[in-house]
Image (cartoon, helix red, strand yellow):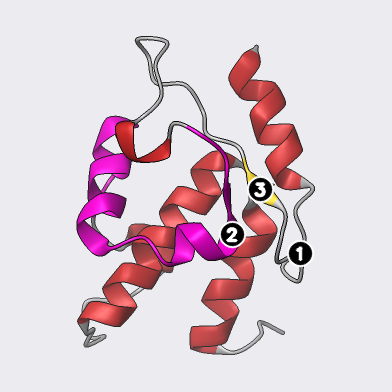
Amino acid sequence: RTNLMVQFVNSQIRPGGRYCQLQPKMMQDGKFPPEFRIPKTVDEVRAMDPSSVDRVLRAYHLPTDLRSFRLTPQDTIGPRTAHQGKLCTLFDYLGATQISERQRNKRTGPAY
């Protein structure tokens, strides 16, 4: 129930909301990931180093590959693109889908 409310609150965050805070979800054991115990602004989450993002994804049992960035095997990716893809996975899981869609559209252009 708590995570459902967190997801709803995070879904209200608009891409331009620089000071809006993403709320962390609880893990299965009722705790928060060490790197994400308290709410963070979207910019703070984007500024997290790649290893911290990986630890948060693993804490939530989320994939650390690039499935959510909708890449094909033919796509070549660099570290920055990989980091952006992982952030999209995290934003999606937290319910901040407007943020993740904006990230994806920055890379690929808008879908028509």
Measure the alpha-carbon separation of dots 2 and 3: 6 Å
Could you tell me which secondary element the residue under label 1 belongs to? loop
User: In the image, residue 70 lies at what x, y percent?
Assistant: 41, 69
Evaluate whether residue 16 shows in this view.
yes
Q: CA distance from mark 1 to mark 2?
A: 8 Å
- The residue tagged 2 is 42
Q: Residue at x 59, y 59 (%)?
A: 42
Q: In which quarter of the view is residue 34 placed? A: top left
Secondary structure beneath disc 2? helix
Q: Are marks 2 and 3 in contact (CB under 8 Å)?
A: no
Q: Is residue 50 above or below residue 9?
A: below
Residue that appears at 44% across and 49% down: 90
Does the magenta-highlighted stretch encompass residue 104? Answer: no
At a point 65% along the width and 11% down the height, the residue shown is 1
| Residue 87 as seen in the image, left or right of residue 104 | left
Q: Which residue is mark 1?
A: 17
The label number, if any, that marks residue 21 in the structure image: 3
Magenta stretch: give its range: 38-64
Residues tagged 1 and 2 counted as in contact (Cβ below 8 A): yes
